[in-house]
Amino acid sequence: MTLPLLSPRDIEFQLYEVLCAETLTDRARYADHSRETFDAVLSTARSLAETELHPHHRESDEHEPFVREGKVVTPDAVKRAIAAMADAGFIAASHDYDIGGMQLPHVITTAALLWFDAANIATSSYAMLTAGVANLVAAFGSASQRERFLAPLLTGRFLGTMALTEADAGSSLADLRTRATTAGDGHAPGSYRITGTKMWISGGEHELSENIIHMVLARIDGAPPGVRGISLLLVPRYRDDTESGERTTNGVVLGGLIHKMGWRGTTSTILNFGEHEECIGELVGEAHRGLGYMFQMMNEARIGVGRAGTAMGYAAYRHALEYARTRRQGRVPGEKDPARPPVAIIEHPDVRRMLLAQKAIAEGALSLILECARLVDEEQTATDEAARREQSALLEILTPVAKAWPGEACQEAISLAMQTLGGYGFAREYPIEQYYRDNRLNPIHEGTNGVQALDLLGRKVRQDDGAGFKALVVRMRAVANDAESLGETAALGHALNDAIARLDRVTNALLHAASHTEPARALANASAYLDLVSRTVIAWLWLRQAAVASRALNAAPSSSDADFYRGKLQAARYWFGWELPRTEQLAALLERADATPYEMQDSWF
């Protein structure tokens, strides 16, 4: 393939022309950095993705993990790639200098990680899960836990997992049954014996690192029922004996491997804790506050799932674009001379339609994920406290959108990429079918999209008296009003203002109805609401790109830059002409509180 997996020019545009990421270097935390250091990080990530991760993309899919003599076997290239990412500092990228990090802005780190996700999501996920565990230890761990575990995690000596799900609980964490009993004599204070079973644990067992650190949700004996009684415990695969100093097994036993349709290179496991051997875990933070701590990692993971969907949809689009430019077949409509040579299929209007739809989805998703990463930087480093609170509220409401929409929409984009390749699209000799299988997991990972819809309508739009939703409306209106002042984007700005008014009206109607009806009925159409919000948000992000492109077009330094900006404008027009109008039907459905699915009875099926 000639084209890179992602567009470096698009990443540059979104980081520096739209999000003004270079201005972050004015803040004390990032003062040592510059545009040059940011570009060097992105260049290193691209190089590692192309040389260390992408070459075994197919191999790790075809030779998924298996158990031999009690140990999980993975391709050798997986371990080398993880070591390369760790050695280059990407697990620790956003952490402080004094613990081995690069103190990079989250928006730059996110842009770098997109290269790994596009190249080989199965391998990159080991490192990204570990980064999440390291973030939990750094934020909530004791001084002793930080001293013993943080450096090995950040350097990739230890890899990490989060162990939430149980067979009968699924996303309903209030029903989990894993127990934690005070360990007593012979163990350090804050130690507990862990018993229970977790499943769907990505990276739960392997031989890729010296140790595996499991962040386990469990109930300490005597804890209150429901989510208020959940604690977070750090459970290593191996623990160091306090007397001998020797490393011993810790009663974490593989119960079996789960074989998924996608992400096949990542071990997905059932883990038994304390079944035949004592399993000791350490309490992280305070007892019964584990779910709140874990939600930090889960929210990071949810945006990470959106990033993965974005990367795979983008990579599939780039493959389809390259194929369409080089595959010659047929003649354009109206051509009468059969002696004329076949044209590249990109000359066919319907192929261009499919490619434009893929571009609009992939580049829109990229804008969403980078926007969320930029909000994290604002939340953590903005000098004005009120501004930090506003950015935090905006990030809260965008998180379910960022988790759900890229995976859902990029599945359609990958399907269109498959259609662009025709029969080759679903052949395993070509990469599209693997992206299709891999991405299909993203609407399920880290809370299904239905859970995200319930979270958005049931919690996020109400949270703090609607602060996040109000901030979103203000941010979107500012872009719409600015676009209305530009000749090239004026009509789009007017259309976005109409869409914002529609979204605001529907949201207020739903919140009013929720206070006058049973919760289940009020939330029955939450998925339609998530779709409505998502399409409006992507319209906002596309219009922002279009306004920047419109202003830059006349001063474009080269014809390729001019073509790039024209492509941005055309993709924005596509979104507003083909995708945003669907919000009108969604709004009508929500406003009339259509109860057809809700009133369907079990016996009628």
Image: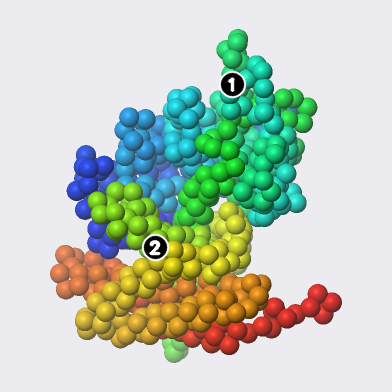
Image position of 364 with respect to 219: above or below: below
356 relative position to 98: left or right: right
Question: What's the residue at 65%, 16% (across, down)?
Answer: 186
Task: Give the residue number, with chain letter if any, for mark 1.
Answer: 188
Q: Quadrant of residue 556?
A: bottom left
* Residue 547 at x, y percent in the picture: 26, 73
Q: Which amino acid type is marked by label 1?
A: Ala
* For the residues bearing labels 2 and 1, Cβ distance under 8 angstroms: no
Image position of 167 with respect to 249: above or below: below
Q: Quadrant of the C terminus?
A: bottom right
Question: What's the residue at 63%, 85% (across, down)?
Answer: 594
Task: Give the residue number, with chain letter if any, for mark 2.
Answer: 394
* Residue 103 at x, y percent in the picture: 31, 39
- Which numbered disc, 2 or 1, marks the residue that appears first in the sequence? 1
* Residue 249 at x, y percent in the picture: 66, 22
Can residue 108 be seen here? The reply is no
Of labels 2 and 1, the one closer to you: 1
Q: Secondary structure at mark 1?
A: loop
Question: What's the residue at 57%, 12% (across, down)?
Answer: 245
Q: Secondary structure at mark 2?
A: helix
Image position of 369 with respect to 242: above or below: below
* Residue 588 at x, y percent in the picture: 54, 87
Of residues 468 and 43, the one nearer the viewer is: 468
Image position of 178 with respect to 468: above or below: above
Q: Quadrant of residue 395?
A: bottom left
Of residues 588 and 217, the one nearer the viewer is: 217
Question: What's the residue at 32%, 70% (across, down)?
Answer: 475
